[in-house]
Amino acid sequence: MAEGKSNAKFITVDIDDYADVIRDISPSVTAVDIPKTVDTTDVSGYSDGAINVTVGQPNQPLTISGNYDTTADVGAHTVLSRLVGNISDSVTITVQIGIRAVPTSNDPEYEGLFYCTSLVYGNDLKFEAKFEPATATAPAWGSVA
């Protein structure tokens, strides 16, 4: 794997959509947010000198932002509008990050099964799609095969 910095130019976003067809919506995408947070629960007692918490389950939502695009089969609107709110089928999302070039073998890859829970368009027709993990198996970082 190459080492170094990269930018959105070298990110691919593939969605295995409702028809089990891999759709590359990368041309529409301008940003991908992949936070990993962990829920906490306050377990403090009145006599504790400070707040105590216990760590819970990880939360790994995924947010994809970009431009409105109705290109047949690969436009972000064309693909995502069919997925939002559909919890009968989860979709595989694969984000590959090329290091100073298009993604290649051993470059970083993030993949998991998700439900699309929100698709919002702003007044400039930029979209923001939010996804939540669909199974007990957390999305994970790996390497491009």
Image: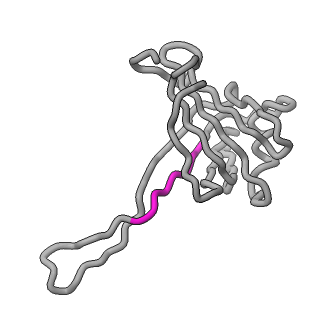
* Residue 77 horizontal side relative to residue 13, left or right: right
Q: Residue furthest left?
A: 49
Q: Is residue 65 left or right of residue 54?
A: right
Magenta residues span 56-63
Residue 88 versus residue 100: which sits nearer the camera? 88
Q: Is residue 25 left or right of residue 108?
A: right
Q: How many marks?
A: 0
**Closer to the camera in the image, 17 or 85:** 17
Q: Residue 117: x, y in percent?
A: 67, 56
Rendered location of residue 45, percent (x, y): 22, 84
Q: Is residue 145 magenta?
A: no
Please state the horizontal and vertical placement of residue 82, each as a whole percent of the image: 82, 48
Locate residue 28: give its quadrant: top right
Q: Residue at x 75, y 39 (%)?
A: 16
Determine if the magenta segment contains residue 61.
yes
In percent of width and height, residue 7 lies at: 49, 22
Q: In the displayed structure, would residue 87 be above or below residue 125?
A: below
Residue that lies at the very extreme toward the bottom in this rendered image: 46
Residue at 52%, 43% (x, y): give it. Answer: 140
Helix, strand or loop for the magenta stretch, by majority: strand
Q: Quadrant of residue 79?
A: top right
Which is nearer the eye, 9 or 134?
134
